[in-house]
Amino acid sequence: MAIRLCVLGSGSKGNSVLVDNGKTRLLIDAGLGARDLKKRLNMAGVDLQDLDGILVTHEHIDHIRALETFSKTATVYAHNHTMQAILERGIELKLSQNFDSECFSIGSMDIETFRISHDAVYPLGYSISDNNSKITYATDMGYCSQEFLTKAQGSDIIMIESNHDLDMLLNGRYPAFLKRRIVSNVGHLSNYACAAAINELAQNGVRKFILSHLSEQNNLPELAYWTIIEYLKNKGANERDIKLYVAEQRQISCCIGCN
Ligand SMILES: [Zn+2]
Ligand SMILES: [Zn+2]
């Protein structure tokens, strides 16, 4: 079976996605409250005991909230520097495995990491593949690095941040320092920047994208969706070949398969 994704939640209040190929089941991030996340995992048809691991992108609370509880049952995988940052926050992990290599395997899945630009100690994105499918996860990034664009090639599905509409952010109620942080190179990706990345990746053959980590204050699902469709149209891309999903904060997504 090819890899399928179920987004358990996405946004500044908590992030987690289930990656499942029938043999191996991973979570990327566990940022919702433990009870809520466990319930959502069950709704996706998976028990906590069934997980082969939890990959952590970075130590911000919206990515690690359930980690301590979940680590009693499933092994947490984090880069050395991120693991240290998690432990320094006083979070105790019962089952954990740190890594510093760019490639490793968990069960039937091969994991490849790449650096992303964000204000955490060592933020990573992940490409995960098995014999017949590949997905890439990249959220929380101030800009799209060339490394991300290269590593994401050949993916069947890319989960990519579409955090804010720039006008909504700049005219919104956030304090100036927070606006500056979000638009900085180590902040979050705007709808427009996401659209440019999708256009480039679509030209290289990627067909499915999940717009993720949408700001509840500074974005709207329809606005993110249509900003990207309009951008693709303007660039002459055949947007009907491309499937866009919008991940939600409050409910789990449908099951999104690689084929
Ligand atoms: Zn973050
Ligand atoms: Zn985040």
Image: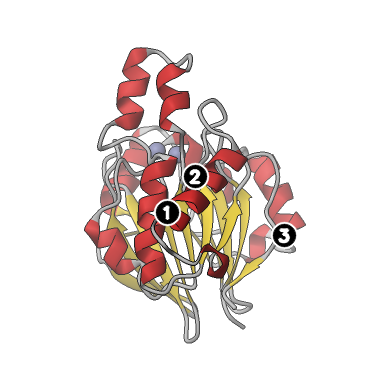
Q: Who's the residue at 69% across and 55% down the image? A: 41
Q: Who's the residue at 36% across and 22% down the image? A: 179
Residue 227: mark in rendering: 2
> Do the residues under discs 1 and 3 have CB atoms within 8 angstroms?
no
* Position of residue 39 in the picture relative to residue 95 (left or right): right
Work out how far the residue at label 1 is from the one at label 3, CA to CA, in angstroms: 37 Å
> Which mark is in front, 3 or 2?
2
Write down the residue under mark 1.
234
Element at label 1: helix
Write down the residue under mark 3.
44
Q: Of the residues under marks 1 and 3, which one precedes in the sequence?
A: 3
Element at label 2: helix
Work out how far the residue at label 3 is from the one at label 2, CA to CA, in angstroms: 30 Å
* Farthest-out residue, bottom: 131
> Do the residues under discs 3 and 2 have CB atoms within 8 angstroms?
no
Q: Who's the residue at 50% across and 69% down the image? A: 207
Q: Quadrant of the N terminus?
A: bottom right
Work out how far the residue at label 1 is from the one at label 2, CA to CA, in angstroms: 11 Å
Picture coordinates of residue 120, whole percent (x, y) = 30, 38
User: Within 10 Å of the Cα at label 3, are there few (<14), some (14-19), or many (20+) other Cα atoms?
Assistant: some
Picture coordinates of residue 22, whole percent (x, y) = 64, 77
> Do the residues under discs 1 and 2 have CB atoms within 8 angstroms?
no
Q: Who's the residue at 63% across and 44% down the image? A: 248
Q: Is mark 2 within 8 Å of ligand 2?
A: no
Q: Of the residues under marks 1 and 2, which one precedes in the sequence?
A: 2
Amino acid type, mark 3: Ala
